[in-house]
Image: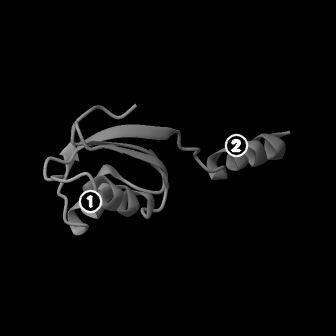
């Protein structure tokens, strides 16, 4: 019985931790033309773990849904910065 309990405990400890999708809003103030959102979106969706990106030119915002086990907010802001559009966190992660 003790071996069975020990095996069950080990299985629980070895099981992967499932990450929940998170959504953040990034402020991208340097978008200055209607074509800029295309570049920002392409940069964001290339980040591993990003499942959805929506960029709003009028509000200068990008809303990104991602797997937090595969990427970070820093990786998202790095992606926009590397594409020529620095961004910062504008909203709270959900």
Q: Residue furthest bottom?
A: 82
Measuring from the top left, give residue 51's x and y in whole percent: 51, 50
On residue 27, the disc is none
Measuring from the top left, give residue 83's x and y in whole percent: 25, 67
Looking at the rendered structure, the secondary structure element under dot 2 is helix
Give the labeled residue for mark 1.
Answer: 80
Considering only vertical position in the picture, is 49 above or below 94? below
Q: Residues within 10 Å of mark 1 (few under 14, many from 20)?
A: many
* 35 vs 20, nearest the viewer: 35
Task: Identify which residue is drawn at 66% across, 49% down.
Answer: 15
Q: Closer to us: mark 1 or mark 2?
A: 1
Task: Identify which residue is drawn at 32% across, 59% down.
Answer: 75
Rendered-image quadrant of the N terminus = top right
Looking at the rendered structure, the secondary structure element under dot 1 is helix
Image quadrant in which you'd find residue 76: bottom left
Task: Identify which residue is drawn at 19% across, 51% down.
Answer: 87
State the count of labels.
2
Image quadrant in which you'd find residue 84: bottom left
* 62 vs 15, nearest the viewer: 62
Give the labeled residue for mark 2.
Answer: 9
């Amino acid at each position: 019985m003790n071996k069975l309990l020990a095996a069950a405990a080990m299985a629980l400890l070895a099981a992967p931790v499932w990450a929940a999708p998170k959504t953040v809003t990034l402020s991208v103030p340097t978008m200055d033309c209607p074509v800029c959102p295309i570049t920002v979106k392409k940069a964001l969706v290339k980040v591993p773990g990003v499942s959805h990106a929506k960029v709003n030119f009028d509000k200068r915002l990008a809303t990104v849904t991602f797997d937090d086990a595969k990427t970070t907010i820093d990786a998202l802001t790095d992606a926009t910065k590397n594409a020529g559009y620095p961004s910062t966190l504008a909203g709270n992660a959900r």
